Image (cartoon, helix red, strand yellow):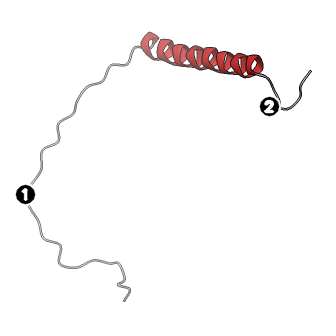
Amino acid sequence: MNHSIHSADRATHLKIVVVALIAGIAVAGFGISARTNSDYTQTAHVIKAGKPMAVTSSDSSMVR
């Protein structure tokens, strides 16, 4: 048995890639199914801008 990824043969590298691909697909599928099963009702709230105003003074200190 080879304990180093550097000296592993082609079949070992292929197995690692296949397992990683299957795990990635499983995680993505779980995330998509968890998102679509929940009922999110989103409503848009429109906020209209008020009249323009000018700020002439502030309480913050100025650093120069």
Give the residue displayed 89% in from the left and 29% down from the top.
3
| Distance of label 1 from label 2 (alpha carbons) | 66 Å
Give the residue displayed 38% in from the left and 86% down from the top.
63
Indicate the position of residue 56 as horizontal and vertical percent values. Answer: 17, 78
Question: In the rendered view of the protein, which quadrant contains the N terminus?
Answer: top right
Quarter of the rendering containing residue 5: top right
- Disc 1 residue type (three-letter): Lys
Q: Is residue 45 above or below residue 9?
A: below
Labels 1 and 2 touching (C-beta < 8 A): no
| Relative horizontal placement of residue 63, taking residue 3 as reference (left or right) | left
Give the residue displayed 13% in from the left and 70% down from the top.
54
Q: Is residue 40 above or below residue 59?
A: above
Give the residue displayed 52% in from the left and 13% down from the top.
29
Would you call the spot at circle 1 few (<14 residues within 10 Å), some (14-19), or many (20 or more)?
Answer: few
Q: Secondary structure at mark 2?
A: loop
Considering depth in this image, is 42 or 34 the residue closer to the camera? Answer: 34
Indicate the position of residue 46 as horizontal and vertical percent values. Answer: 17, 36
Considering depth in this image, is 27 or 3 the residue closer to the camera? Answer: 3
Q: Secondary structure at mark 1?
A: loop
Q: Is residue 29 above or below residue 53?
A: above
Quarter of the rendering containing residue 7: top right
Quarter of the rendering containing residue 44: top left
Badge 2 is on which residue? 5
Q: What is the number of the mark on residue 51?
A: 1
Considering depth in this image, is 18 or 29 the residue closer to the camera? Answer: 18
